[in-house]
Amino acid sequence: MGSVFTALLVRMLNPKVFEDLRTKQQLGYIVQLSNMEGRRFQKLRLLVQTEFEAPEVRARIERCWKRQLQWVLEEMDEAEFQRQKQGLGSLLAEAPKNLNEEFNRFWVEVTRRRYDFQRRQKKLELLRAAELQAFRDFVAQLDAAPRLFIEIHSLQRS
């Protein structure tokens, strides 16, 4: 269920994080929330390309992230949860548009050594069974999880 909840959380929060950090705070030109699945873990990545100093950026990202998680935990209603589930479900149920897309879906399973070629269908079934309280419990655990910040600095020659 973790991969389904992670994908659902990214679907919900990516536009909100972008609006806050990029549009309102003008923190950076690129602001993107995404998820990646490993064999035994889920990873959320919030990417910000900015010219501001790292401590300030980390603090602003952390405040934004806390606000978004609080929204999920306290304010998001059942109707919004169902709407987001339906949107993600539509993406998961979408048939490949061409052979290349179908190949890439299968190749991911091979490269990750899972060989679960029905993974999308299984995720769709889990998504349909997902309940708001279980999602909130997942988000509460995520809120307590450790965070890793990676900084890449560009050295400019003067």
Image (tube, helix red, strand yellow):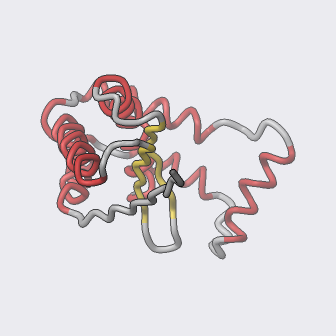
Residue 23 locus on image (x, y percent)? 36, 24
Look at the picture and state if 127 lies above or below 23.
Answer: below
- Residue at the front extreme? 158
Q: Between 30 and 51, which is closer to the camera in this rendering?
A: 51
Q: Quadrant of residue 150?
A: bottom left
Q: Is residue 25 left or right of residue 66?
A: right
Quadrant where the N terminus is found in the figure: bottom left
Q: Residue at the spot x=24%, y=54% of the render?
A: 55
Q: Between 75 and 36, which is closer to the camera in this rendering?
A: 36
Q: Residue at the spot x=38%, y=59% of the render?
A: 2
Q: Is residue 127 visible?
A: no
- Residue at the left extreme? 74
Residue 155 locus on image (x, y percent)? 49, 57
Q: Residue at the spot x=34%, y=35% of the render?
A: 27
Residue 108 locus on image (x, y percent)? 69, 62
Q: Is residue 108 visible?
A: yes
